[in-house]
Amino acid sequence: MENQSKFLLAQDYSVVAKVPEDTNDFYSFFPSNAFAGLGDGKFLVASSVIQRPSPGTSVVLVLRSLDNGLTWNETARLNFKSEVEVALFAKDGRVFMLIVSEGRDGILMVAASSDDGVTWETPVEVIHQTSAKFANIPFEEKKWVKEKDDKDDFWFCAHQTAMLEHEGRLYFSLSRRCQTVCVAVCELASDILSPKSWRISQQAEMPIPKELTRNLFPGRSMRCLEGNVIKVKGSLRVMARAVIDRYGTSNMAAIFDISDDGGEPKLTFGQFYPLPGGQCKFFIIYDEKSRLYWMASNPPADSQGACDLPERKTPPGNDRRFMMLWYACDALNWFPAGCIAMTENLNEAFMYPSIVIDGDDLAILSRTSKLYEGLRSAERAKKGFHDANLLTFHRVRNFRALALNIFPKM
């Protein structure tokens, strides 16, 4: 196959962080990657580090670049008594870390930094949901065991997806048990660290019509999660990852409509819509200058096992080797801008993209899984590419020049 580098937009990357080296007792990985642009060439990244076998605790690493993403230095370590996922939001010279804790309860915490991520205030619990079944059980006893998933669990999934500031409010999508979707709303004029500033919708379910699945890959599966909050012609929507037939029906997103009159926000399932890479976590951002939505996602090469590929640990549609860039004028019909980065190895991935517009460039953070010397690949291969050992920073230069003029002539 001829040299493919001419098709790649940002294959060269800087390493933001590596997990600790594996030992005979455990290995570590990054489950999430949070990303914020601070201006003047500064970027901030945060990610929890999880160990397997799990000690039931985690540490969040905070890293900062002062030179446009070329080099990175650790600024803080935050310790938690449970496994957590994080996202970042920058506002008025402060950075806020949104934190969800795995357990029986649905918990959203917020921590704040006023010095670009060097020091952090103690995280404050702003949302706490629990079922009647677990209401009288101490939190530390509400352990979550994946193999015995309970429909009464309220635990949240929250990664860095597109948040939306609209009419003085911040909208952020959460998923309960990777099955249903909700939206948390914060009044930005109030104290972001106060529970009184936050509201949350009821959970909305994504139906799966029988016509969308061939039941090729039976077994326990995620359903709907990792929603991007966007605005289209004044309407607020959540566009979320749709896992159907354990990735057998790929390239599909679930679209929910948000209504919010200041009371309890409401989230309603609207429709399915074809979206390249919609079966995995994708990220959508709107660019005022080009009047286009831009998206990074992972389309699969073979979603139903038709190709003669090496044996793999996950269904074939869960393919994260190609991180692609797309653009659209309506956030529905996507045109290809190119491949950001790729790997041919099924046990590697560039995945979970987060995007910041940086002048004429797109700055992109990837949760990346690469095999390298010293890696205990036999252990990590049990999860395939999922258990990422790197965070990588990619820059797509002059990104607006990659788009055709897709607006019709009047």
Image (tube, grey):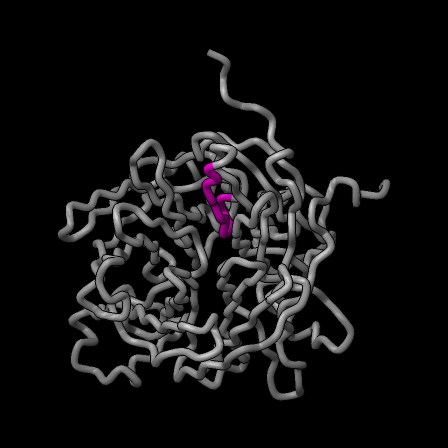
Can I make out residue 291 in this image? yes
Please state which of residues 75 and 372 is positioned toward the viewer in this rendering: 75
Q: Quadrant of residue 107?
A: bottom left
Q: Position of residue 282 (x, y in %)?
A: 50, 48
Q: Quadrant of residue 380?
A: bottom right
**142 shown above or below 71:** below
Please state which of residues 258 and 387 is positioned toward the viewer in this rendering: 258
Residue drawn at (79%, 45%), measured in percent from left and top? 5
Could you tell whether 166 is left or right of 17 in the image? Answer: left
Q: Quadrant of residue 371?
A: bottom right
Q: Position of residue 238 (x, y in %)?
A: 35, 45
Q: Position of residue 11 (x, y in %)?
A: 72, 52
Residue 283 part of the magenta segment: yes
Could you tell whether 61 is left or right of 157 in the image? Answer: right
In the image as oriented, which residue stretches furthest toward the top? 410
Residue drawn at (49%, 52%), measured in percent from left and top? 281
Residue 131 part of the magenta segment: no
Q: Which residues are magenta?
A: 278-288
Residue drawn at (43%, 76%), measured in percent from left and top? 83
**48 shown above or below 89:** below
